[in-house]
Structures are given as C-alpha cells and as structure tokens.
Image (cartoon, rainbow, N blue to C red):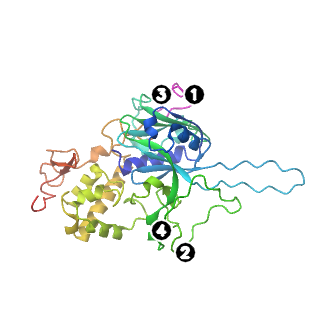
Amino acid sequence: MPELPEDETVLDGLDRLVVGAVVRDVEVFREYSVRRHDGGPDSFRDQLTGRRLSAAVRRGKFLWLPLTEPAPQPATPQPGAAPLVESVETPPVAALLAHLGMSGQLLVRGATPDTSASATEAVTADATAQSDAPSGTAPGGVVPDGAAGTEDDWQHPHLRVRLHLDGAPSGARYLDFVDQRTFGHLSVHDLVPADDGATRAGGAPTSGIIPASAAPVPAAQGPAAPSAVTPSPGTPSSIPAGHGSDLPLLPEPVAHIARDLLDPNLDLDALVSRVRRRRTQVKRALLDQTVVSGVGNIYADEALWRAQVHWARPTDKLKAADVRRVLDSAAEVMREALVQGGTSFDELYVNVNGQSGYFDRSLAVYGQENKECRRCGALVRRDAFMNRSSFSCPVCQPKPRGL
C-alpha cells in the first residue's frame, strides 16, 4: 500500500500540473470507485463539474483537492460609470478526497513535457515511459498534446474515473484515476475544522461541519486572514490542517487521522508521550493512523531497524529517548524515500507521470529475509505480523524478554 512518501510524490505532481484547473466534465467508469461518495456517481459528477481545483493537500495517506467556485468575470463598465469591484473567488467549503488503497494511481495526461518533471523526477526517471502508458508518450510518462492516445476514448484497462480539465497550468487535459485492485476511492466531502490544530493553538477543540451548500463569503470580506493571536475557545484554529495548503480545514473522513512525522505543525513531544501511554507493541503504534499517520509496514520496519528497536517492544516500557529515536528514524527514512520518489515493487505504484519510485533499492531489512544485515552481518529474519510480515535483525534488534 502506498505510504507517506508515495502520496507526497503524487501530491507534488498534482500541485505542479493540475492545481488551478477547472473540472469541465467527469466520467465514472466504475461506480465502486466512488462508493464513499454520498449520492453516487451522478452527485459526484455534479459536485465536481465547474469547480476549480484550488490546492493539493495531504495528511498521512489521504490526498485532497479543495474545490472553489471560479470568480465570475466582471462585465465591461459603461463609459462614465464607476469602476466595477473585482470579483473574489470564494474560499473552499468542500474537497475532492482521494485514497489510493493498494494500487490506486492518479495520472495526469496531456501536460506539456517541459512542465511535467521536477528536478528529482528528471534524475530518477527511466528513458522510456511505463508499459501501461499510451503510444506517443514522452519520456517521463506524460502524453504530449497531439500525440496518439490523447483522445477522450483512450482508456487504461483499469481506468475508473476521469476528470476533464480546463485551464491547468501544465496544459493537462485529464486527471485519471486508475486502480487495478479497486481498494482505492474518490469522493467529495464537506470541509471541517481540524480539531488537533484548534487544541494545539490553545483553543478548545472545534466541531461542526461547514456544509458545501453554505452561503459564500461576500466578495468584499473575503476569507479571514490568519491571525497571530491565539484563538479563543471555540474559535477554529489558523494552523494548516494538512501539507500543501494554509487552510485549517480538512475533509470530514480525515478528521480522525493524526498528523504525520513530516508535518511542520506536529507536536513531537506530545506524540512521544501519546505513544508511551499506549499499551501495545511499538510497531502497532507506528501503524495506528490515529496516533501518527503516513507510516506503513515498509517504513515501520526500516525505522525500527535504524533505531535498533525490536518491533514487539511494548510502548509503555520504552524510554522517551527510545520512542523519539524511533520517530526520528521514521521521519528520516521517509525523507530519503521521498527524494527517490517512493518505493515501487511493481507497476502498481507510480507518480502522476507514470514513473516508479526507486527507494526499494535502499531497503535495509524489509523484504530482505535471509540476507545479511548491513550493520552486523547477521541474517535478516521474517516474523508473522498482523496477517503481514515484519522484518528485523536478530542481533541489532533483540527480542524483548518473554517473546
């Protein structure tokens, strides 16, 4: 399953290639892929059509694109008439939420090649496009305008949803949701205050939904500017709810998800205390998205190996320094993975250009059963863990007593 570095890589591509675009039309090819949307495919299409994708935001493994109504163009004033007040785009009250599941991909098509690759992607990208891309694909996996395969009738065999775009900064014409195993999903949800942000800022936790049907903020007022003053109890926080936007709101289904280790607004001391208060194994705590988000099986094993902590160590027996070392190691390994575009074991994880990540070549223990530990030379072992596997070094990460 894609973890934080993979989702962050996709987020970066969306931010560069499609943010600012207006959704002209929506096609749903498989209703199951919008199963989390209240109202079904028709409502999903209606709530997206005509909306602008105003930002790309992430918290943990969830991605969302806040939706705004494009500002109406003012009419030309008559000679001698007072100048017209410029229209202001209303702040978003809803967002397109994406969860990639096991194999979900958000693919941008039709962008011009010179806007499609960042410096990192240019270094790591293969010279040829992915095998599942249409003919005419340029290096980097982007389909240039005018090439074969850019027409509306081009379909990936696992294409589930397509957004037709106008006005994307890259010239992109489509945002495609491709999902082979169909565990991923798209949906539109109201935005709600981030409770953890409100508490962190000193006010009482906020609650309540800002409905998508709420009246727009008058153009003369505009959205409230962030204040440096600590909010009073009951006042929504100005702390960003996720990475990629200053908006202190997030989709309702994400409200229970904790901040991740790369979030600049994470309170690390509070997280250390929260982990130590839990009576569970340290790896289970790392995978609990209500404790800390974005860490999955791969990066949990890699972080614990770096910190030299066995995955079954009880959290309430760990010293604060040990917990901090584990969390710092997890943040470090995810930053390194992010530079390399994430971890790809097969063609199911790609970025928005169809390119695979390369961090799998740097894994120290995950998937390395019976290979020598890079640190001590002992053979890496695999243990059964929550219907999955846990990889560790028996020397560097000794088992806790009684296990």
Q: Is residue 54 left or right of residue 283?
A: right
Q: Determine the residue positioned at 53% across, 41% down.
A: 44
Mark nearer the N terminus (2 vs 3): 3
Residue 224, compared with residue 394, is above or below; it is: below
What residue is disc 2 on? 229
Residue depth check, mark 2 versus mark 1: number of the one nearer the observer: 2
Look at discs 4 and 3 and give the one toward the viewer: 4
- Among the two numbered marks 4 and 1 on one chain, the one whose residue lies closer to the N terminus: 1
Characterize the local packing of mark 3: few (<14), some (14-19) or many (20 or more) Cα atoms within 10 angstroms: some
Q: Which residues are magenta?
A: 134-155
- Tell us which disc is closer to us: 4 or 2: 4
Give, as a three-letter code, the residue at label 3. Gln
Residue flagged by tag 4: what amino acid is it? Answer: Ala
Mark 2 closeness class: few <14, some 14–19, many ≥20 residues within 10 Å: few
Residue at label 4? 198
Residue at point 22% right, 70% down?
A: 319
Magenta span has 150? Answer: yes
Q: Is residue 359 magenta?
A: no
